[in-house]
Image (cartoon, rainbow, N blue to C red):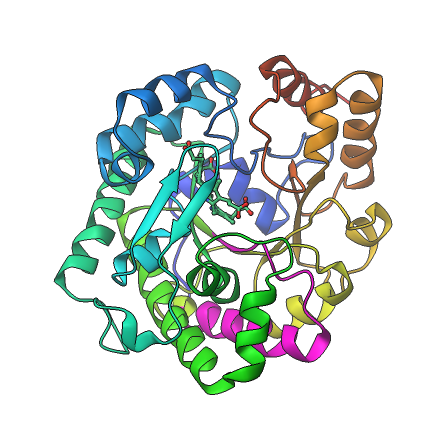
């Protein structure tokens, strides 16, 4: 059953990009991963006023304010809900802290039996209350955001979230998690299955509250060999996509398997996502020519370090990406999150060049 797109959806450039409905000389939509955050003085101000990062995530008015900051400043075509991928383990009852200057810290687990809020299949009242705060933020944001801007909801992909749950923090090679998955495949599978279930539920809740698209962040999928990639990245993502589509058949879903350009065709064909986030290492020739599906939307892939550095090399690369993707289903973005020391003038320059008349 297909639903008629609302007037709002039609007026959003972000949504039209998925439908292949951008004019030939129309600039692509643009937003940036981590566009709300430390590179903005107005973010640092709110952040310093609130006790902790989690307080910011669970205070709907503040999360709303921070979500809208980059839209107000740069007029991006989409806002992304201000939250974090580690809200899911937190709602499942795992202690999560955000340590200033160090990143997230969790009390590591070795089995889903250690998650107080989970009965193996769902969330308890405390976990549901945490998700409700996020849904409240979504409806506030959607009410305040102008109708031509899309609101993006998100979750971490099960594999990436599991790496934090098992190691207790981010790690360059995810060795602790990958070793655990080899030693205890059935326990790791149970954790992945729980995350599939909870993330599907969470994304559906965000959509019910008003987001116009969702992105599934698999930030750490890159180092996995093909059999592991299939089992821990493709299969769980495919289940989330199918679960979300069962309730919301028309919602655009973007997958971001970072560092996995070599697996992109398989990921797109097997998971059923509508869009693929392309990281910095995806060759422009591949991103612009052939990912095996003529209707797949591509999103990316400017190097955040180049945006930080600026200058003529930045200008040239922005135009190179924009021109290579002209006429395609494309959303301009970075290849990974914006870096905190990035000068805001560079971001403004990026937006201006992407939108310059051609
Ligand atoms: O104190 C602070 O201000 C903390 C910095 C911060 C911010 C601004 C963290 C801690 N999370 C966020 C917000 C956030 N995280 C958003 C919404 C804001 C936006 O995009 O504008 C989103 C979508 C995320 C997603 C996220 N969190 C990912 C996936 C995307 C990616 O960058 O790869 C990951 C891996 C995380 C974990 C996380 N949370 C925070 C940090 C510093 C990290 C990364 C830690 C690490 O490198 O392991």
Q: Nearer the viewer, residue 70 or 156?
A: 156
| 230 is within the stretch colored magenta | yes
* Magenta segment boundaries in residue numbering: 215-243
**Residue 93 point in image, percent of width and height:** 25, 61
Q: Is residue 299 left or right of residue 7?
A: right
Residue lying farthest top? 345
In this rendering, position of residue 271 left or right of residue 184? right
Q: Is residue 276 above or below residue 138?
A: below
Q: Is residue 68 above or below residue 215?
A: above
Choose top left, top right, bottom left or bottom right for residue 223.
bottom right
Q: Nearer the viewer, residue 16 or 43?
A: 43
Would you say residue 107 is visible in this rendering?
yes
Res. 1 visible in picture: no
Residue shown at 21% from the left, 51% from the top: 130
Quadrant of the image containing the C terminus: top right
Identify the residue at the far left of this view. Answer: 125
Q: Residue at x 84, y 24 (%)?
A: 316
């Amino acid at each position: 059953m297909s639903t008629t797109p609302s007037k709002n959806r039609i007026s959003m450039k972000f949504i039209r990009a998925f439908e292949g409905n951008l004019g030939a000389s129309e600039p692509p939509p643009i937003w940036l991963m981590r566009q709300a955050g430390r590179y903005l003085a107005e973010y640092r101000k709110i952040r310093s006023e609130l006790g902790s990062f989690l307080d910011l995530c669970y205070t709907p008015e503040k999360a709303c304010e921070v979500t809208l900051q980059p839209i107000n400043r740069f007029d991006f075509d989409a806002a992304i809900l201000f939250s974090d991928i580690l809200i899911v383990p937190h709602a499942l009852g795992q202690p999560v802290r955000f340590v200033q200057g160090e990143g997230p810290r969790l009390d590591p687990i070795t089995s889903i039996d250690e998650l107080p809020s989970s009965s193996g299949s769902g969330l308890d009242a405390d976990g549901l209350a945490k998700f409700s705060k996020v849904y409240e933020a979504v409806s506030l944001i959607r009410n305040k955001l102008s109708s031509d801007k899309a609101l993006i909801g998100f979750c971490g992909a099960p594999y990436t979230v599991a790496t934090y749950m098992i190691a207790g923090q981010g790690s360059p090679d995810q060795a602790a998690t990958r070793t655990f998955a080899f030693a205890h495949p059935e326990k790791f599978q149970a954790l992945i299955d729980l995350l599939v279930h909870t993330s599907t539920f969470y994304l559906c809740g965000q959509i019910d509250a008003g987001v116009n698209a969702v992105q599934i962040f698999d930030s750490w999928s890159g180092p996995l060999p093909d059999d592991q990639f299939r089992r821990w990245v493709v299969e769980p993502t495919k289940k989330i996509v199918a679960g979300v589509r069962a309730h919301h058949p028309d919602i655009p879903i973007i997958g971001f398997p970072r560092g996995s350009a070599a697996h992109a065709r398989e990921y797109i064909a097997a998971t059923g996502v509508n869009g693929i986030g392309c990281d910095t290492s995806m060759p422009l020739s591949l991103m612009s020519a052939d990912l095996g599906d003529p209707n797949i939307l591509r999103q990316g892939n400017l190097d955040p370090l180049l945006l930080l550095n600026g200058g003529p090399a930045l200008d040239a690369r922005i135009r190179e990406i924009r021109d290579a993707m002209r006429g395609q289903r494309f959303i301009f973005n970075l290849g990974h999150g914006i870096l905190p020391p990035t000068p805001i003038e560079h971001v403004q320059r990026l937006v201006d060049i992407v939108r310059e008349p051609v």
